[in-house]
Structures are given as structure tokens and as C-alpha cells.
Amino acid sequence: MSELPIQLKQLKSFTLALVMVVMSSTVLADVRVLLDISTSLAVNDPQNNRVNAIVDLTSVIPNGEPVGIWTFGQYVNLLMPHERINNQWRSQARQKLNQLTSPAIRSNIGRVLDEAAYDFNFSNYRRNAQIVLVTDGKVNISPNTEVNLVERERVLTQLIPRYIAANAKIHTIAISNDADHAMLKQLSSNTGGVYQNVARTGSVSKAMMAIKNRIAPSTVMVDSSPSFQVSDSTMQVTVLLKHEKGAVSLMDPGGAAYSAVDPKGTRWKIGKGYSEVTLSSPAAGKWQIKGDINKKAPIVVEPDITINWVMPENDSIVRENVIRLKATLQNSDGSEIDSELMAMVEPQMTVDNRIVVVNLEGNTISARILPTQDTKQVNISLKVKGGTFQAESSRVLNIMPLITSELLTLEDRYEWRLYPADMGMQNVQINATANVMLESDNQQQMFMKMVGGYWSWSLPFNSPAGDYSVQLAGTVMIDGKSHDIPLEERMISLPMIGAMKGMDQFDTVLTMDLSEDFIKDPMPEFAELQADLIVDQNADEWSDAQD
């Protein structure tokens, strides 16, 4: 009982609109931003919102975590070196990003994914890379469509397995309806990343926020005191102060003042109606907030008790009958919370703003939800009250179908492909048939598993002419449990000239020039970037460079 008042005192709240605490013992992020600089982006994002979103993302990544920025068009450029982030790195990144133009006429997505994976086989790779791919296009490395088709195939069948093996997650932001959404969805869903369609939502910042929460999830705490407590274990605190006018400042436990004018090693970002400050290795004790802050603004902080989501492991999950949710409460160092303090905890979980029944056992909170068949996204919020504190954590789940499909027009055939929602899943088997009907002829043909991890059925162009009706049916087996594949039908015309008139009926149709004088352009040459990356393969840690 004697420890309880001390623990509650440590949990007393702080003032602000956002605080994130990062512990030194845990590597939260190895972030690699891949930014498309094709000409069309100047049209699709004229306000340059993607740059502001990337700057905001880097502002919440703790000092010492590895971050890099690559830009790509036809060629790939390492805009900011992949190294430990600090204030100088952030300043240079902001300057270079704001100076960026969009001169490129092509989009070499495969090459930039190659470059970002440069160290996957290094002994000091920590298997936690978080890739953020921002693009408005599709694989486009040549004026010849066949070359682009071959490269797209390589991305799907070679690069995705490579990223899965490295436990590297690819988060994608599509900024145009013209982007290859089918491929971007595959990149994210198969690697456990987050796919965001800005063309649909209209907000790059919101899309980046969803990815930011996935990369560096935070727990917040609500209170009304104009101060916040920092424990000995705190490595970094980010405070977002909302104020109507004037300036704000902070005072540390020793009485020293910090402001945008006199930062003393802190970093500040000033905006309309707010000031954001990040403290690295802050002094332990009570920090005061001075100034005309907005008392009506929510006041939140990351407490010493954190909410750690256990299930599901990824935010893109395969659709099942029931989704199991599980979170644990821990001290910031990962240790278990005192049982007397746990006795005071009152959890509340909402799913799409509806309260669901939760079970609290020990330090584990669990629930089950049953999304409808047309549910594509689930918004979850978990609030935990106890004594004087209230902690909250939220996450967004993208509900993926068991399989996705696309019908391709290749050089000599139509090919219908089925991709498991997660190509990294173990013990998955697709048993699917194509019921092929041409006038009175009816045949059943099997989808065959290919080396790239997908299943395929094809109709050669030299097949009898006519209008084919092809129906998909079958099951997906996952860990011995059978799931029905939704019935699907496609209409295909032969000869190919007839099919060309109906291209818009397909999810994805890639065509090529079949004329006799067709000559494939050579693959473009690229300047190798590895020589610019100084990495000690034998080192156990990253460079010790500090601010």
C-alpha cells in the first residue's frame, strides 16, 4: 500500500494537446520515406501538402532513430541520408523538401523500393523498417507498356516477398485516382502496412496521421493542470500547446525557462493558434506551462502507464467472422503494473463510436467485434480511467477481403490472378475454379499457384473466337479453416481486338504494342546510391552522432 500514493503522483497529469514519451530501451521506428516527384504531383497536390505531412512525421520521431528520405521519378535520389535523426537532420530535411520541384516524367516505384531495402541483408539490420511510399502514379519506367508490365510483375512477385522476409512494412499514400491502387493495396496489405487513398479522403495530413499512429503509437492522458510530470525514464516529450494569442513557454523543475526565442536545446514549431515543443532527455520532475493557453482545448499526455495493443498485430487484417482485440497496460519500461493500481482501472472501448463489451483480466483488456461484410475500416478507441488519470489510445483497422483479384492483358493471353490478402500468411491455400462458358460449351479449369505466391488462370489469345463468360468460385483455407470466395464473373472477348473495346470493365488491364516492328526499350540506367551510404556492417549500433 505504501507504493500506491507515489505511483498515483507520477500519473498526475500534464497540460497540452499532444505528448508522446519515447523510452530509450525500445526502438520505435526505422522510417524510410519514398516520395514521388513526377510532374503530375504538382497538379494532384498543388498546395504541397505531402511535404508538410512528411515534415510533421519526422517531428514526432525520437532523436536517435534512423530515418531517410528518397525521391524518385525515372531515377532515384537519396534526398536525406538514412541515419540517426536529430535537430540538424530535421532542419536540412525541411529545407530540401520545401525546395523540391516535380520534374520527373516517370515513376520508378520498383527501383526506389530496391534502394530503400539496401541493408535488409546487413547483420545490423533490426527488422523493423517502416516504409512510407507517397505517389500519385503507377509503375512507369518506359514508353513501352511491356517493360512497365514486367517491372510491375517484379514488384509484386519479388519485392513484396523480400519485404515480408525482412519484416518491413510498406505504408502507401495514393494521391490520385490514376494511381495503381491495386498494386499499392498489395504492397501495404501483404506487408502489414497501411494503405491510404487521398484521392478519396482528400487529406494528405489525415492519411499521414494514420500512418504516424502506426509507426509511433502513443498513449495520451487527459487532465486540466497547467503542468506535467516527467519521470526519470523519459527520453523525449512532445508538447502541443494551443493558445489564442501571445507566446508560451515552459519552466523545468529547476526553474529554467524555455521558449521559441530561447530554446536551450529544445525544438519549437510555431503555427496559427499553437506552439509545439519537443524536449529531448528532459529533467525529471514537474514542468510548468506559462502563457495564455486555451483552457478549453483538450489536455493530454503520455503517462507512465501505457496502452500496448497486442491483437491484431497489424492494422490491415484479413476479414474473418470475429475480430479479436487485445491490449495490455504496462509501465513505460514494459514492467507489470502494481495489482493495487490495476484494481482502480476502469476500461471503456468504442468501435466506430459505439461502446463494446470488454473483459479485464490482470493487466489485459480484450474484446470481440463482428464487422459487417461491407465494412472496410474500423475505428477503435480505448480509454482507461484510474484514480486521477485517464489514458487513451486509438487505432484504425483496414478490413481486407480474403483475396483480391485482377484481370491482366498480357502478350499472348488474358490472365486472372488471385492474391491472398496477406502473402506472408502461413498455411494458406486457395482452391478456386474458373467456370468458362462459350455459347453451349462449358468447362471448369483450376487456378494454379504460381512462384510469386499468387494463383492464376489464363485464356490464350489463340482460343476459339467469341464472348466468354468466366465465373470464379472456390474456397480459401487458412490454418485449416475454410472460407468461401465471393462469386465473381468476368466477360472476355476474343479475338483480342474485340476485347480492347471493353477495357474499362476490368480492375486492371495492361496492354502492349503487338505490331511487327515492336522493339522493347532498354531498361534505364541508374546511378548507384549504395556508395553514398556509409554503413558499418559489423557495427552493433548506429552512428553515435548527436546534436
Image (spheres, rainbow, N blue to C red):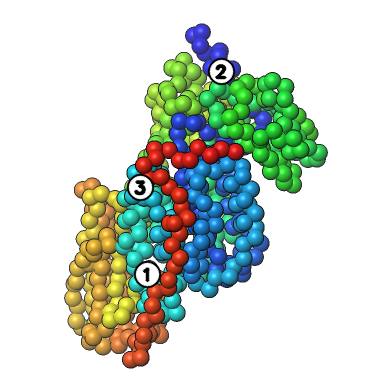
Task: Specify the label residue 122 is tagged with.
Answer: 3
User: Is any part of residue 325 visible from this angle?
Assistant: no
In percent of width and height, residue 377 lies at 46, 51
Q: Which amino acid does label 1 sit on?
A: Glu
Q: Are marks 1 and 2 in contact (CB under 8 Å)?
A: no
Q: Residue at 61% of width from left, 57% of height from top?
A: 97
Q: Which of marks 1 and 2 is nearer the N terminus?
A: 2
- For mark 3, give the secondary structure: loop
Mark 3 or 1: in front is 3
Residue found at the far bottom of this picture = 516
Cα distance, mark 3 to mark 2?
44 Å
Cα distance, mark 1 to mark 2?
57 Å
Q: Is residue 527 left or right of residue 224?
A: left
Image height check: is 207 above or below 41? above
Query: Few, some or many C-alpha atoms within 10 Å of disc 3 (few <14, some 14-19, many ≥20)?
Result: few
Q: Residue at 37% of width from left, 69% of height from top?
A: 151
User: Is any part of residue 500 visible from this angle?
Assistant: yes
Q: Is residue 365 left or right of residue 55?
A: left
- For mark 1, give the secondary structure: helix
In percent of width and height, residue 408 lies at 34, 74
Choose top left, top right, bottom left or bottom right for residue 487. Answer: bottom left
Circle 1 is placed at which residue position?
151
Query: Few, some or many C-alpha atoms within 10 Å of disc 2 (few <14, some 14-19, many ≥20)?
Result: some
Q: Nearer the viewer, residue 496 or 441?
A: 496
Task: Specify the label residue 68 is tagged with.
Answer: none
Circle 2 is placed at which residue position?
8
Q: What residue type is labelled 3?
A: Phe
Q: Are marks 3 and 2 in contact (CB under 8 Å)?
A: no
